[in-house]
Image (cartoon, grey):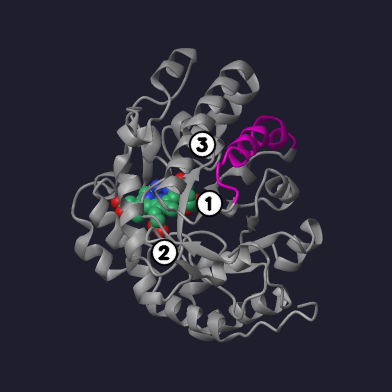
Amino acid sequence: MENSFLSTDGTAKKSDFISACRNEQHPRVPVWFMRQAGRSLPEYKKIRGTGSILEAASDPERAAQITLQPVERYGVDAAILFSDIMVPVHSIGFGIEIQPGIGPVVENPFESIEDLKRLRTLEPEIDVPYVGEAIKILSQECPVPVIGFAGAPFTVASYLIEGKPSRLLEKTKALMEQEPEIWDSLMNQLSDITISSLNHQIESGASAIQLFDSWAGLIEPEIYEQKVFPYSKRVLSSINNSRVPKIHFGVGTQPILHLIAVAGADVVGIDSNTPIDAARAKLGNEIAIQGNLDPEICLEPIEVVEKAVSEILKLNNNNFGHIFNLGHGVLPDTDPGVLSHVVEMVHSHKLLERKDG
Ligand code: 1CP
């Protein structure tokens, strides 16, 4: 069944989320939230422990439990594995820490050709066995599809080069322009790591994958096309299982939306500045869209949230290829009650049956 996902016991379960990824008919709009695991949930804080997120994510039982928390609390239509985009490069020993309140920090950032030696092929069963184990636990316990994910080569490269979160990406831009051969080698190595990581998650039971190229919109469209797009395309075209929907997401991608799609996505994730109807005008009605409630709006009074949710559902215009989500991740101060209300609102909005059957 196309609109279902398989659990490891071999039973096929129907899923509005999978149907929407495939732009097929289903009764109600599916919804999940980027960064729904962790963050503001009190039940997360209880079991999170005091170590780094990288430690919490490397304990498969705990990672599976955290992944399930938003499914249980909000009733979302998909779970996203509790992990981080830096896990694969961390696991091969690049020297990454995730600092609370900051994000990924690299002790010795990537600077020169010598640093290529610090990267190697990812052997998932040896380097990140806990990722597969967490997904296997979830295949048994999670009532909705589990989304596996990876950072796209560009976004991961930007952290390795900048050494810490940056919105200017000056060093990254300098390297890609001034050292094209080093850039190509770095991006190829990161592409191989990303492909191994995603295929491992799928083999372990992930029912969909999302490629996060969070910062793809921070570079000029022409540069994106030459220096970033080819690698993301290779990653998406190297997914072994064609049944697994592929979601491709970035912030500020309006000018490059067609490239985000033709890189090989089944679903294009859009940010809050890209109205759904504008995205469809660029992409056509065949490809599914994921998004795009502004996470900042979730901090506003509930009437403001309701209005914004209704507006998005209206702009979607009864299209089956819509997965409701935020335009970027849940903000740490978000009241979980607001997200529960958003899920109720989205679920109570009925999609009309397609006349063509
Ligand atoms: O729903 C979930 O929270 C699932 C797990 C998850 C995901 C999907 C985490 C846990 N991180 C991510 C993806 C991720 N990590 C992205 C892509 C999504 C996005 O754009 O937000 C990015 C860019 C990162 C890098 C990262 N890791 C940041 C952002 C830094 C920046 O440049 O602004 C941060 C703050 C982290 C740390 C992190 N990752 C995850 C958690 C729960 C945390 C917080 C740290 C902690 O609890 O110790």
Nearest to N terminus: mark 2 or mark 1: 2
The picture places residue 257, in percent across and down from the top left corner, at 72, 51
- Asked if disc 1 is less than 8 Å from ligand 1, the answer is yes
What are the residue bounds of the magenta stretch? 222-242
Q: Which residue is mark 3?
A: 195
In this view of the protein, which residue sits in the foreground, 8 or 246?
Answer: 8
Q: Amino acid at mark 3?
A: Ile
Neighbours of disc 3 within 10 Å: few (<14), some (14-19), many (20+): many
Would residue 42 appear left or right of 86 to someone viewing this image?
left
Residue 100 position (above or below residue 74): above
Residue type, label 2:
Gln
Q: Which mark is residue 138?
A: none
Q: Secondary structure at mark 3?
A: helix
**Left or right of 221 in this view: 165:** left
Task: Inspect the image, locate mark 1, and give the three-letter code of the amino acid beneath it.
Answer: Gln
Left or right: where 215 falls relative to 133: right
**Is residue 40 visible to the viewer in this orientation of the structure?**
no
Q: Is mark 2 within 8 Å of ligand 1?
A: yes
Q: Quadrant of the N terminus?
A: bottom right
Q: Which residue is mark 1?
A: 210
Residue visible at 63% across and 39% down?
237
